[in-house]
Amino acid sequence: MALKLTEKLAYVFPIIREEQLWRLLRENIRAQRHLYIIAVLAMIVVAGMTSATAWIMRYIVDAMTIPDNRGMVFLVAGAVALIFTLKGLATYVQSVALTRAGNRIVATQQIKLYDKLLRQGVSFFNLTESSDLLMRVTQSANAARSIIDIIVTSFVRDLLTLIGLVTVMFWQQPLLSMVSLVFGPLAILGIRILLRKVRAIMEQEMASLAEIIKVIQETSTGIRIIKAFALEDRMAFRMNKAVREVEKRSNAIARLEAITSPLMDTLSGFAIAAVVALSAVQAFGQSNSSPGQLMSFVTALLMAYEPAKRLSRMRVSIESGMVGVRMMFGLLDQPETLTQHPEALHLAKGEGRISFDQVSFDYGNGRPVLNNISLAFEAGKTTALVGPSGGGKSTILNLILRLYDPRNGTVRIDGHDIRLATFASLRDLISYVGQDTFLFSASVAENIRFGRPDATVEEIVAACKSANAHEFIEKLPKGYDTQVGENGAFLSGGQKQRLAIARAMLRNAPILLLDEATSALDSRSEALVQEALQHLTQGRTTVVIAHRLSTVLNADKICVIENGRLSEEGSIDALLAREGTFRALYDQQFGGAERRNSA
Ligand code: ATP
């Protein structure tokens, strides 16, 4: 029974069954179709001119060897010049058009990948290593580009050139051509075997590359710990191992890619030898083909070798690139962990009352972090969250920011479920200073301006003054224009924290979340910043987490969070009178001092 054309093609090119490959071509070639049309037209000219080169050999040889044809010499010479000029021009156009389209594809894919990352929720980043993301964004877009390049050049230029040259061969010497073509299918069989190996090796190579990036990242961020604990040898060992792995795999791939060449060389050698021998026999046996025809045939045969070789190697190269493309689509197709409701509404600035209604939450590992918590943060008041480490205090702030959604229950602001609000309007209401101060690699002023992009210089300076940061900023080499380094590497922990507070002050939002915001300050700076925070918290709904109880003494209400539950709630006096967890914490921190004072 006759196989369908696509099935036959799929046997020769199994890669066409790959849905991801079709998707890559569909999405990218269509977007760049103008450039690809130009490139394809140029390639048709290149293929045509290459075939014409073999074709013209007949007339060159005949013009020189057959006395009657001498008059043709100038015509033939002119045709040769024209063929080579056209080929040169077309090659230039093809190469420029392809490169431009390729560069655009890399840029588009990288933007798409990054947009996708930005839309992902925090839980996605908890689960995905940054080195893996780096790999995917940088490498896989390039893999996409190279696959498209290979397909377009091989399928259009090489295939057309091959068809053109084979046509010339058949035209000049049909019998000899049939003999030489017997060897083609043999080569295809050999290459099929190599492909299976390539895929496996490429996947391992990508994993090792990600490990190299991870080691370098960890070295850069953890250099203090590496030095302090003398971990240099261990890091060097890890790096060596990863680098050697990549080296080994690259060699294996190179070996496989290279083996297609001798395979084709040997087969072609046999083909050419057999045909040359036959052509000699034919030339002696019968004389109805001219020397030019024979020459043209042999030229076409020799020229057909290169495109045929590239076509046969194409599949190995596509297979190795497809690993990167699958990784890219893997990332683009990941479901978004936290999305904006399709009919999300703008959350208007109101009083800023936050309420938790029977909220339960876990981080996806089944271990409950918040257990059926109901509590309210009154508008314009300061509520402090205290309790043992790991109790769930930071998680409460994460839920107010909607970095995660509760498993059960509802978080509301001014009575509105925050899941039904747009991300932009929700986060507009909130200023946040976290435990780990993060600064961008930019100047001091730019870092503070992230709080409110339209702020004036005067407003930035005023915020820094309130945060007790102005004084040290003035002493920096370039003042507000000083670069802070990667994550504020040129600043002390306390200075970074004051910049983060200034950023939150500038934001001027009705809700203020402070998670251990003053933990890195010395007691003098802390007192000053506390005073600044007092101004900032005036009239704002403030939720403050602090282990040092001195920072929560001014709170209107204190909530004690233990094991994901609200164990105590009330004013400081009420809680002290209760002899509960808060009283115990209080005695632990202030009891000694009181006893010393009374002694
Ligand atoms: P601390 O006072 O030490 O900052 P906390 O009361 O703020 O502690 P949370 O940071 O809310 O506590 O953490 C509560 C629990 O959730 C802890 O047991 C912690 O191990 C776990 N946890 C926190 N973040 C994650 C996360 N991203 N993935 C998984 N578990 C997490």
Image (cartoon, rainbow, N blue to C red):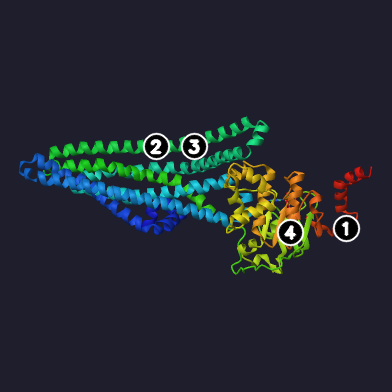
Indicate yes or no: mark 4 CB to ligand 1 under 8 Å: no
Judge the density around disc 1: few (<14), some (14-19), many (≥20) Cα neighbours within 10 Å. few
Res. 258 mark: 2
Helix, strand or loop under label 3: helix
Taking 257 as reference, is 117 left or right? right
Q: Nearer the viewer, residue 59 or 581?
A: 581
Farthest left residue? 68
The answer to whether 25 is drawn above or below residue 212 in the figure is below
Helix, strand or loop under label 2: helix
Q: Which residue is mark 1?
A: 573
Q: Nearer the viewer, residue 165 or 13?
A: 165
Judge the density around disc 2: few (<14), some (14-19), many (≥20) Cα neighbours within 10 Å. few
Q: Nearer the viewer, mark 3 or mark 1?
A: 1
Q: Which residue is mark 4?
A: 537
Q: At x 60% / y 44%, what residue is drawn?
A: 484
Query: Label 4 to label 3, Cα distance in Å?
Result: 59 Å
Q: Nearer the viewer, mark 1 or mark 2?
A: 1
Q: Which residue is mark 3?
A: 249
The numbered mark, 4 or 2, whose residue comes first in the sequence reads 2
